[in-house]
Amino acid sequence: MTAIPNNEKWYIAELVMECQTEDEPRNVVHVNILLVQANSSEDAFVKAEQLGRESEHFYLNPNSKVVTWIYRGLRDLMVIDDELEHGAELMFEEEIGISEEDVQAMLSQKSQLNVFRPHKPRDADFPSYGSKDILDEVDRMINPEMIDPDKN
């Protein structure tokens, strides 16, 4: 376990990132949940905003269309009060007056938990926002005999 000095705290930042692909009318939005180390709530806010801005980038997809990731802002920023160790409470939600039916609706079977769900392939109509450079590199790794015409 790593000890955290008393004057430093950990925060959870929920960054909203929008992905736009050239000639694609639909966007893709991710909420990225990041750990932020800061000395105060204001410091955490500044650092979370910086992480968001640093996440902005662009590249070509396999169809040679420009893919742009834009930081849209924070959805939430929460302090972690416990030490970072097994079983530490990272965050909580509170609701009052919840019926038994609604409590049961909150619960998931093991097979429904994200880590146990089978990967669903995306349909052919899903916006293509993968990186052409990365996919080309994977192709070169899988097929080392491939010759890159741009390098000859």
Image (tube, grey):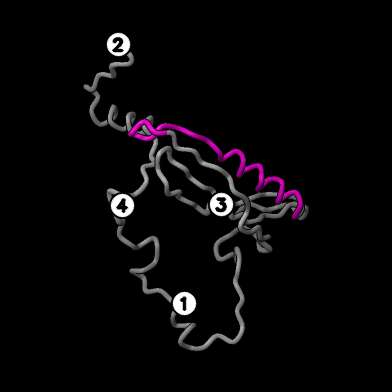
Task: Give the extent of the magenta segment.
Answer: 41-65
Name the N-terminal-most of marks 1 and 2: 1
Instruction: Report helix, strand or loop for mark 4.
Output: loop
* Residue 152's disc number: 2
Q: Amino acid type of disc 3?
A: Val
Circles 1 and 2, Cβ within 8 Å, touching? The answer is: no
Badge 1 density bin: few <14, some 14–19, many ≥20, Cα 10 Å: few
Q: Residue at x 75, y 55 (%)?
A: 41
Q: Is residue 84 above or below residue 92?
A: above
Q: Which residue is mark 4?
A: 122
Drawn side of residue 9 relative to residue 143, left or right = right
Q: Quadrant of the N terminus?
A: bottom right
Badge 2 density bin: few <14, some 14–19, many ≥20, Cα 10 Å: few
Instruction: Report helix, strand or loop for mark 1.
Output: helix
Name the N-terminal-most of marks 4 and 3: 3
Name the N-terminal-most of marks 1 and 3: 3
Q: Which residue is mark 1?
A: 106
Circles 4 and 3, Cβ within 8 Å, touching? The answer is: no
Q: How many tags in the picture?
A: 4
Residue 8 x, y percent position in the rendering: 74, 52
Drawn side of residue 104 relative to residue 52, left or right = left
Q: Amino acid type of disc 4?
A: Arg
Q: Which residue is mark 3?
A: 16
